[in-house]
Amino acid sequence: MIGGILGILVLVWVYQTATKANVSNVVMWVMICAVVYMASQFLLIGGSNYLIESMRASEGGEAYERDVLSIGDRKNVGGFQGSKGTFSSVFFELFPPLAGFLLVAFVRTKFVLKESLTKSNLFSGFGDMLKSIKDSFKNPDNK
């Protein structure tokens, strides 16, 4: 869910940047960034699932079962309890969308805008995009 929302925001960001920069083939660049974002999601979520399953299997040994009904059984939890488990779960949930965002920011800066890689160039225009989305919900009659 988080990755989908961030993906939509990133593609709107790329579209607004490309139209403001008068880049030819705006839709092509948006589609390229969509493919980059989705490919990173596919690879990183698959890698995260592999790591989680290997961590659970290493703690459960050969008796590890992926059974929904055995969740209440403490020996099959797999170490995702407590603060370590909370931080691991949050990391595995948020890392793929944030990495995809950074990859799209790289493509946008290097290939769409053809600028150098600086922090201000990588993230320029994202705040303006969020502000324009917020302003779009205002009623024009109440100005």
Image (cartoon, rainbow, N blue to C red):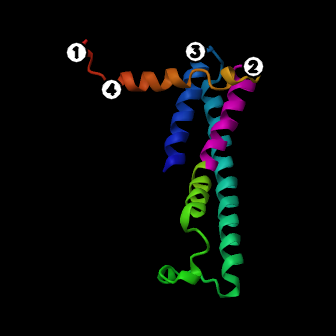
Mark 1 lies on residue: 142
Q: Tell me where the magenta segment starts and ends, as one range.
A: 95-114
Q: Secondary structure at mark 4?
A: loop
4 vs 3, front mark: 4
Q: Which one is closest to the eye, mark 1 or mark 2?
A: 1
- Give the mark nearest the N terminus, 1 or 3: 3
Q: Which mark is first along the chain, 2 or 1?
A: 2
Residue 108: in magenta span: yes
Secondary structure under the numbered disc 2 in the rendered image: loop
Q: Secondary structure at mark 1?
A: helix
Badge 2 or badge 3: first in the primary sequence: 3
Furthest toward the bottom, the residue is: 63
Residue that badge 3 annotates: 20
- Between 121 and 30, the one nearer to me in the picture: 121
Q: Are marks 2 and 3 in contact (CB under 8 Å)?
A: no
Between the C-alphas of marks 1 and 4, the distance is 12 Å
Asked whether, in this view, residue 35 is left or right of residue 89, the answer is: right
Residue 114 marker: 2
Which residue type does callout 2 highlight?
Answer: Lys
Which of the two labelled residues, at mark 2 and mark 4, occupies the earlier sequence position? 2
| Real-space CA distance between mark 1 and mark 3, rounded to the nearest whole angstrom | 28 Å
What amino acid type should be assigned to the residue bearing mark 1?
A: Asn
Amino acid found under the numbered disc labelled 3: Lys
Give the left or right position of residue 69, taking residue 143 as reference. Answer: right
